Amino acid sequence: MPSTDRDLIPVVDYARASTDKAKDEHTVRDQQTVNEGTAARLGCRIVARFADNDKSAAKENVLRDDFEAMLKVLRAGKLSDGTPVMGCIVVADDRLVRRAGDYERFVDAITADEGRVFADKRGFKDLYSEDVESMGLMGAVISRMEVKKMRRRVRQWHRSRAENGIKSNGRRPFGWQEDRLTLDPVEAPLMRRAAESFIAGKSMNSIVKDWREKGVKTSRGNEWTMNTLRAALDNPRLCGWRMIRGELVTGKDGKPVCGEWEPIITPEQWEAIQAIFNARRGKQITYSGQAVSALARDHREHRYLLGGILRCGRILPDGAMCGQRLKADKQPRGNGHRYMCRAATQGGCGGLSRQGEKTDEFISEAVLAKLEERSVTARTDIGPWLRQRELDEKEEQLRELRTRFAQRRISNSLFFDEVERLEPEIAQLRADRERHSLAAQQTSADISDIRRRWYSETDEDRLDISQKRTYIRAALHAVIVHPAGKGKRFDPDLLEPIWRED
């Protein structure tokens, strides 16, 4: 072995390792770099190090920046400062490449000039030899096959854990303690209240705004956003279920597997949340749970209760009704608010206005009375979902088809024809069940409690405007405000509610 550093072969070192992110992003869990003593023993001197920690060498969509930079150095035969480079050294060649294409690029770069060396802890490999290069290619292919097997085993491991109701790994989800099993005494009630409020009509924007004002943070310590709240509400973990790749994990009986952790809400509440999300994709539902054309929901905060719901009933000179939505604004002297028709330049007639507080009070009472009437009827009408047996039968048919296909007991054409027929039918039945769950959740709400919270004096207990507007819009198409004439007092008979059909 040469006695001085000057006599040693200048090489670069490449490392690829996992990092322990739970402690420090730059702490290497497994030693995957060659130390100076090992390099000197092999007759090499390390002049530069390249590392791509936490980057897979097997995935095609992963860019290893240092690997690409190293290839440029090897092709050039020198570093950017002119230091010569005569080869590369790694702990093990499977830490360098796991794809045949990358192996060929590496060999082309390192053999771009004569006399280059490549070594791992076991010694040198002559990459100029066709036999060695072929063996390296075979090694890369075998390594890729092993990676695929590992991925398959990991997927099967995750699914096995899910099917046995075992908690998933990862960061602590909001609402649970660090063990991811026990409910957090502060966060769980917040999430439960958010789910109940969302089902009752409160907008996600309003919930996020409320949590931000109270200083509520995500489990990672970040500010809540609409996207993070939607992801939390959309997660079946809330009701004790698991989902893998968009599908609920079910047992042999076709029922969702219940996890070992404590649920925050009931399965019926989670399905009601799904119905609302589905409704926003164009499958809107009414208060009674029936699928109809799009029913407007508020996705922004309103300052006034009936903004956009009241319509001008003034008759124009041509005999037609104005029909323009009334806008809300503060009274000129700052005393409350009023609703008024827009100016003619904005599409209205500008000839009608109404006192805001009294209008809000009258319509609120009218809607609460209608909800009480519907609640009595709905409790007797809603009943259990009557298509569960039909759904169970179709799910069983699909499971049987998949079993027969896996055992090669059915032709490809017949299998896919049947699957394409069954999957849409099952999806429709599940959506119908979600709509039924939402209707059941809404009708089971105690209307007396809604009335109490409608007028509650405490901010924590009182329904906010977005919730009140959801109840109002579920009960009404609109309210026509007929002209009263100058100087006349507020007359509730001039407010004409246009009710939605029961």
Image (cartoon, rainbow, N blue to C red):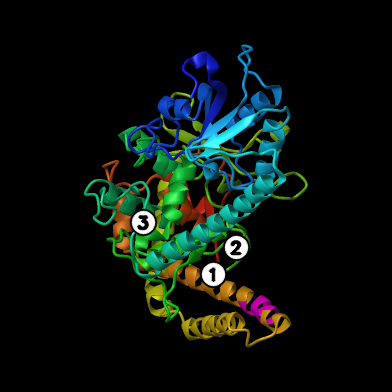
Q: Give neighbour class at mark 3: few <14, some 14-19, many 20+ (Cα, 10 Å).
A: some
> Residue at position x 45%, y 33% from top?
33
Q: Mark 3 or 1 closer to N-term?
A: 3
- The number of numbered badges drawn on the structure is 3
Q: Is residue 357 left or right of residue 182?
A: right
Nearest the viewer among 282 and 423 is: 423
**SS at circle 3:** helix
Residue 386: x and y in percent read 47, 83
- Which residue is denoted by mark 3 in the rendering? 196
- Which residue is denoted by mark 2 in the rendering? 283
CA separation in Å, label 3 and label 1 = 20 Å
Nearest the viewer among 150 and 200 is: 150
State which quadrant residue 374 falls in.
bottom left
Residue 421 falls inside the magenta stretch: yes
Nearest the viewer among 27 and 364 is: 27
> Residue at position x 48%, y 36% from top?
53
State which region is magenta: 416-422
